[in-house]
Image: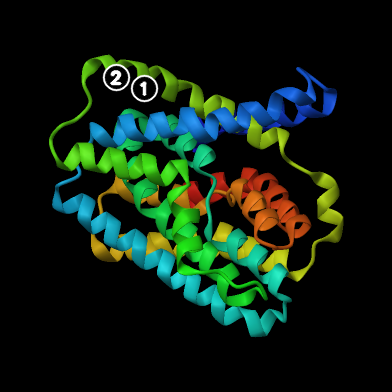
Amino acid sequence: MQLIVTALWPVFALLLLGYLARRSGFPGDGFWVPAERATYYVLFPALLVERLASAGLAGGESFRLALLVSGVLALAALFCALCKPLLRLAAPAFTSFFQGSIRFNTYVALAITAALHGSEGIVTAAVITAVMIPQLNLYSVLAFAFTSEQTFSLRQLLMTLLRNPLIMACLLGIVLSLSGIGLPWVLASVLELLGRMALPLGLLAVGAGLNLRALRSAGRALVASTLIKLFLLPLLAFGLARFCGLDVLTTDVLVIFMAVPTATSAYVLARQMGGDADLMAAIITAQTLLSMLTLPVLLIML
């Protein structure tokens, strides 16, 4: 228990520092958007490419983990779709509920994994990330396409996925690993340094983006998505991992990814594709704050 609390404390401390820094005006409002863009387009892709390129992805354990992750996400997406008539949500609100229920905050997940399991856990986390990011982006875009009054062509869907730097980084890292090419040391050392900046700056940016005012307008969509994301998904992942006989470290990392709050990038997608952006901001804020309590409890229990 002490190990888990000690590992989680600096992660949540950086989130709180980011929130306090933004509210106090330090170092200025002009800092946070470029910082978030640099993390999303440069630093985090560098971390993924470096870790995936050096990971042994050809083994049966990686393949089994990829299948399990895909299965959990497919079940979660199906469950959310079945919840639509029960929750009686308008199309924009449903897409925010959907994203809030199945997407994950990569910065928080990787930071917690690194704190608890070090470099070995990061390799497992990179495999999970490589599977989850393309699949979740596809599900999210399809949720907009099937519920929105706007029409989305197949070309639009593909371009939305291909423009995602995290998907491109995952694909590049997987190709470099499976082909045996790897990264030359001149690139590996640079990407490693860039990757070290990704998690602390990403956590500060997540904290800076929290919006407590948005919680006032939240309703059943926020409650339902939070219950699914912070409780149902990690329990489902834990049960399936034990059933499939995954080792302790892999099970731990999988539960961490399923138990972290939803992605802050979900707000951008909601705003760009006609979703309920205010509701999305409320879901992101509520889950991030509540996860400071639920994550330690879940990890200690499981």
Position of 12 compared to 142: left or right? right
Amino acid type, label 1:
Leu
Look at the picture and state if 78 lies above or below 2.
below
Instruction: List the residue tagged with mark 2.
Output: 187
Q: Secondary structure at mark 1?
A: helix
Q: Secondary structure at mark 2?
A: helix
The answer to whether one can see residue 286 in this image is yes
Q: Residue at x 67, y 71 (%)?
A: 94
Cα distance between the residues tagged 2 and 1: 6 Å
Q: Which residue is nearer to you in this view: 229 or 55?
A: 55
Position of 127 compared to 298: left or right? left
Q: Which residue is nearer to you in this view: 13 or 29?
A: 29
Instruction: List the residue tagged with mark 1.
Output: 191
Position of 291 compared to 153: left or right? right
Amino acid type, label 2:
Leu
Look at the picture and state if 285 lies above or below 216.
above
Residue pushed farthest bottom?
Answer: 85
Q: Which residue is nearer to you in this view: 166 or 80?
A: 166
Q: Position of residue 76 (x, y in %)?
A: 48, 69
Q: Which mark is residue 296?
A: none
Q: Position of residue 61 (x, y in %)?
A: 19, 51
Q: Residues within 10 Å of mark 2 (few under 14, many from 20)?
A: few
The answer to whether one can see residue 252 in this image is no
Q: Position of residue 247 (x, y in %)?
A: 25, 50
Q: Residue at x 29, y 21 (%)?
A: 188
Q: Residues within 10 Å of mark 1 (few under 14, many from 20)?
A: many
Position of 133 compared to 21: left or right? left
Q: Residue at x 26, y 43 (%)?
A: 174
> Do tag 2 and tag 1 residues touch (Cβ < 8 Å)?
yes
Q: Residue at x 22, y 58 (%)?
A: 64
